[in-house]
Image (cartoon, helix red, strand yellow):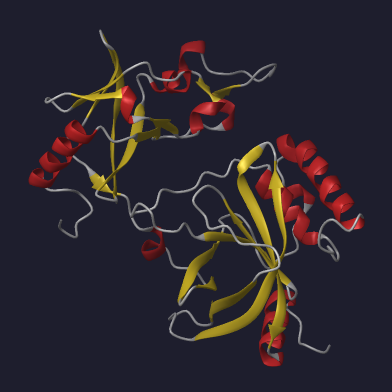
Amino acid sequence: MQNEKELTRIERELVLQYLRDDNVPLTVTLEEKPQQQDTSLVDSKTDFPEKDKRVPASAIFPVAISSSQIDVLKQGIILLKNPARTVQPFLGKQVRVQFYFNRLGLYFITEMKECSQGLAIVVPSSIKRIPDASSVKEYDFTGTVSFKTGKSTVSIDCIPLNSYEVFAAPKWADIPESNQQEAKDLLEKFVASAKAGEGAPIGNGLHLLAVARYLTGKNIAEPVAVEGRAMPFNIIFVDDKRVILAGGKGTENLAEGTDYNLNFVFVLAKNRLLKRTVSIECSVDCIYTNENQVDLKCISLKYDQLKKEDYRFLYERITGKKYGE
């Protein structure tokens, strides 16, 4: 296929044939996510739009449709058979439909309609590739975590999560008010485990604020451009003793007590050519989860070996102070 983001007419026909023959699973989500005030929430006194224009809060999340629920017609129409109730709020709205063709992530945008046979999606003329996030975005700070498996080495990208100031001290106010009670319960659980010797020492505990924020948030992973590729970890907290990696479904499982190599790369100039790499030998000292969001996890990697000059650089980058002051 060409390097352009949009498929050619011939490529589109091949993809349609593939959909008809293989009945691949689809993921459907609203193209324009509703604002919180536009969603219908129970027992709210807020003045909402008219009832028929409301969008349930659950509609901001992707809905997976299995191949057994899909029938693709020659005209390029996808019929949804006995779809889940979670699909109903998409009716009459612009949706993004994502799927994989020979492991390549593709998507198109269309309107979900109602027909005599149920719900239908018309495949438009434009089908596009899911952009490779790692090649599109540029960060001033990134990392990789590596480990040995047999004779080979596995390296996983680690990138800062949007809206998290990874080098700043987390604040309680960073957690949305609607999630604060659940976050408080999690924090109390983590602290109690540490005091009981069931979890790793937590030091000043600041990292737990970032952990509780992530585990109680609505974190939707972006689709990967190539099916089967390891999902990158998100970095949500860094200090001079540990880094907190966060992830969900599709991210690698790291094991407590196992040794890993961590590389941080800092961009030091606007031209992005001047960089500083910090290499750290580390190990997992705790894995945090939330039973209410079983797909999410936060992994605390504590630094075991760090060169003095790298520690000095990391300390000054995080605190904004000269080392030794």
Q: Residue furthest top?
A: 116
Q: Residue at x 44, y 80 (%)?
A: 272
Q: Is 240 on the left-hand or right-hand side of 95?
A: right
Q: Position of residue 319 (x, y in %)?
A: 75, 76
Q: Residue at x 83, y 60 (%)?
A: 205
Q: Is 105 on the left-hand or right-hand side of 290?
A: left
Q: Taking the image as drawn, is residue 174 in sight?
A: no
Q: Is 122 on the left-hand or right-hand side of 68?
A: left
Q: Residue furthest left?
A: 10
Q: Taking the image as drawn, is residue 178 in sight?
A: yes
- Quarter of the picture holding the C terminus: bottom right
Q: Residue furthest right?
A: 195
Q: Is 53 on the left-hand or right-hand side of 310?
A: left
Q: Nearer the viewer, residue 82 or 92?
A: 82
Whether 228 is drawn above or below 140: the answer is above
Q: Residue at x 64, y 42 (%)?
A: 217
Residue 230, picture quadrant: bottom left
Whether 292 is drawn above or below 277: the answer is above
